[in-house]
Image (cartoon, rainbow, N blue to C red):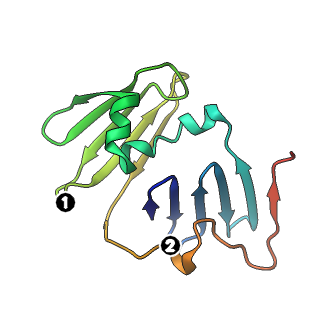
Amino acid sequence: WVAWPDKALFATGDPAVRWMGLSGRLVRLLDFENLSCDDHRLTAEEWERIPLIAVLDPKAAMAQFSIVADGERGLILIPREAGGVSRVNITIGENGLPARVVVSDPQGAVSTFDFTDWEAADGPPEGQWLPAPPDEIICISDPD
């Protein structure tokens, strides 16, 4: 699930055992395998590493990135200013929506996100962008 501005919810596994929710600068990682839940407020540098703007707001992306066509179904986004991301490669699927997003940072780390089965939704499950842990799992927050 992804929504403008700055909201996302990702689930991995079948059935889903790990959830990552983003609401503004707050990220929650909920792991049912390890029975853990962590809340983290993103710093400005960490925020730069999550280029949701490329998916959610293409017009704003043009202000922050140089955009180069990569074949018939690809885009390369290169930040106009140095920061937490060195480039973002986006592959567009047959449905015209992102099928793969590859984010590279200046240290050489690469994160790949594959997207399948895009469909419109009224919102995330139970209306919550930050997944709610069951009673037996306590979320640990960053110290202030």
SS at circle 1: loop
Question: What is the x, y in percent for residue 77?
Answer: 34, 31
Image quadrant holding the N terminus, namely bottom left
Q: Amino acid at mark 2?
A: Pro
Q: Nearer the viewer, residue 113 or 44?
A: 44
Residue drawn where x is 52% and y is 57% of the image: 7
Return the x and y of residue 128 as percentages of the image width and height.
Answer: 59, 72
Q: Which residue is mark 1?
A: 95
Choose the circle earlier in sequence order: 2 or 1.
1
Q: Is residue 16 above or below residue 46?
A: below
Residue located at (51% from left, 59% from top): 8
- What x and y, as percent, mark residue 144? 86, 45
Q: Is residue 13 above or below residue 52?
A: below
Q: Which residue is mark 2?
A: 124
Circle 2 residues within 10 Å: few <14, some 14–19, many ≥20: some
User: In the visual, does 30 lie left or right of 66?
Assistant: right
For the point 17% across and 43% down, which residue is it? 73
Q: Is residue 72 left or right of residue 138?
A: left
